[in-house]
Amino acid sequence: MWLFCRRRQKPQKPPIPRSDPEAELRAFRNKLERSLVESSLNNDKQFLPVTEIDNLVNPRTIRSVLPNKASSEIVDFICHHGKSFFLILVVGNAASPQDLLSIMQSCRDHNMTDEQLPVDRIACVGGKSPCDPRQMHHEAWNVFHDDIWTYICRPFYREQGTFTAPVFRKDEFIYDLKEGCVLPVIRKGQERDGHFSTVYEAYIHPAHHEEGRRSKQPLHVALKKLKPLSSEPGYNVQTAWNHEASALEEINKLQHHNLIRPIAAIRCGSEHYIMFEWADGGSLRELWESQGSEPKDLDADRVMVVIEELRGLVGALSTLHGTNTRTKTANVVRRAANLAGMAASERLAVPANPARRRHEEAKDSEHNTPSVSSLKSPKKTPEIRVRFAEPSDDGLSFRSEDPNRSYVSEESDASSDEHWRHGDLKPDNILQFTMSTKDSSRWLGTLKIADLGLAKQHIFATARRNDMTDQKYTTSHYEAPEAVANVHLPRSRRFDIWSMGCVILEFVIVILYGNKGLDTFYDQQKIRENLNMDTLYFSVDRNVARVSAIVRHWIAQILKDAECDRPSALGDLVRLVRDRLLIVELPSENMTAREVARCRADAAELKEKLDDIWRKARDSEFQGGNYLCLTTHRKGVPLPQPLQGIKTKKGSTTTGRLGDDLPKSQRNLV
């Protein structure tokens, strides 16, 4: 009976047929190649978005392309630690399923993971174990000693860049990438070529920047590629990139709304890049040109937006300048203030003319700063006497013909001080952002200072050119007079203040008279007395620099305009330029507190003055006053009468090597 009670056995299921790993590998390779994205920056290269890596590599796929004997441990290792390494082997089209299994087992044994990618080329490839002690490399790279690498190392090295495209993160700024790494640029727009670099409009793949992970939108950037210039003696692109990258990394921490945001500094083998946010509105120069030949009708909102954006730019400049207060000029100011019995932080009086100066000197106990609107034009412009194109004895100052006066540069005792000035401020380096502005009435959008590292590269090259005395020194339209004093000296923070004065004056001219007025102003350069030494903004006579007669004439003419010949915002801006910004004199070692106060303003004082103008404008707008705008219609308003000629002073010279004829406008492409 027991035979009939025996439990019936269930029939065995037939084994699941395994697909052909070779066929699965070919299909997987085709799918992988279809997922690659072409780089618009390098047309002959492709990259795999990081999101596709996760989509492609999963346990099911790995099992299908490996031999049947592949263990679960190997599959798990690939899925968690070796996705990119595995894909490099697949796309290289040189490894069979058995090769893939052997290599990934070796990777697990040697702890070779994606974190070690990309790898450098090593000499001890294929069957050379133990490695020659002289062949030093990462311990995990011992995996390449296996014989199999003798015939697959070349495609592996070649394909690494495809799977190691960087992901740009907010908490990381400098990216040092291996040769052959592909930048994840999916679209490229306009391109501008400059002397030191080429700037591309570019779009970064959404998977390769943090914001794109959420928005699924590409990142719109300006990508500046530095040129390895062999024509510039003493210039080294690696040094220039290191300098600019370290400066921008620190400047990025300031997080000021009116400083352009650098996103990344990238070294990819021998190529060097700096990535910035893209200015969708172009430059301030382009904005002026878009306003048309004739002036726009004025209204309070239009003028108020100009004041607010100028205030923002000066605030950014003040933040930039204020990061290091240990400069030599700051020490001079503090020392002069201390000798006068004043706190270093107290604002010094700013006498505006000889009459006011005598009045204030008679009242030694008074230190009140006059308001912007009350300042008068000085009867005698400040001046400095300079020796041109001669290196100073100590490398820190240029000397006047007065043996008791030595002009100091604002160099800090710390080498990092040079990061905290611009040195090339002009409308072309002030960029407009419109997309981030929700208020349509803000016709200016947001203005931001850009190219914070460019000026230092320029100085590095020009200051070290051989045989300087045999070349003409071409000064920029917006450079301060001290730029021609000694080309070997670094530029001070107050250099930027002169440049900002030029920008503000030209902005007012565009607002009041349109581009026709600005063109007329630029045309005045034709009457410069000395075309080799004078600029539109300053002139040099017998080694004495002064604010040019052209600028003084135009300021006087503008202040006769109905909008400026009264307490008004635009008038106060022009008076501020005249009385505190376009000032030649700089602090020197032996100055008293009152003499320092008559020198060109610093960024903190300029910010204070613009804050005063903004408060007046805000109060006037609230009370229904006309401080911002008196009349609406500007069409037909006569332009300032151009200066017809400059009277040649007796004994003046017209020889020199300090500049060439300036164009009407200088576009800055980098």
Image: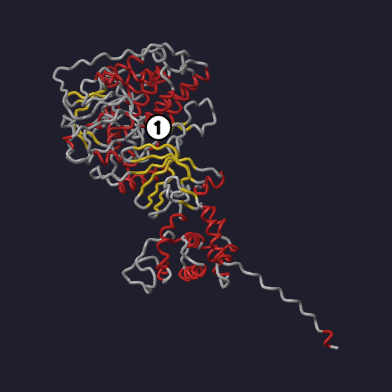
Location of the C terminus (image quadrant): top left
| Image location (x, y in percent) of residue 608 | 40, 28
Q: Is residue 283 left or right of residue 588?
A: right
- Mark 1: few, some, or many residues within 10 Å (few <14, many ≥20)? many
Task: Determine the image quadrant of residue 529.
Answer: top left
Q: Residue at x 42, y 49 (%)?
A: 44
- Name the residue that disc number 1 marks: 430
Residue 525 visible at all = yes
Q: Which residue lies most toward the right here?
A: 1
Location of the N terminus (image quadrant): bottom right
Q: Residue at x 40, y 15 (%)?
A: 564
Q: Which residue lies most toward the bottom here?
A: 1
- Between 583 and 86, the one nearer to me in the picture: 86
Q: Residue at x 30, y 41 (%)?
A: 457
- Between 435 and 159, the one nearer to me in the picture: 159
Q: Is residue 314 left or right of residue 409?
A: right
Task: Determine the image quadrant of residue 252.
Answer: top left
Q: Residue at x 39, y 55 (%)?
A: 178
Q: Relative to 311, is 270 above or below? A: below
Say what secondary structure mark 1 lies in: strand
| Image location (x, y in percent) of residue 197 | 34, 41
| Image location (x, y in percent) of residue 35 | 53, 52
Give the amino acid at mark 1.
Ile
| Image location (x, y in percent) of residue 497 | 33, 30
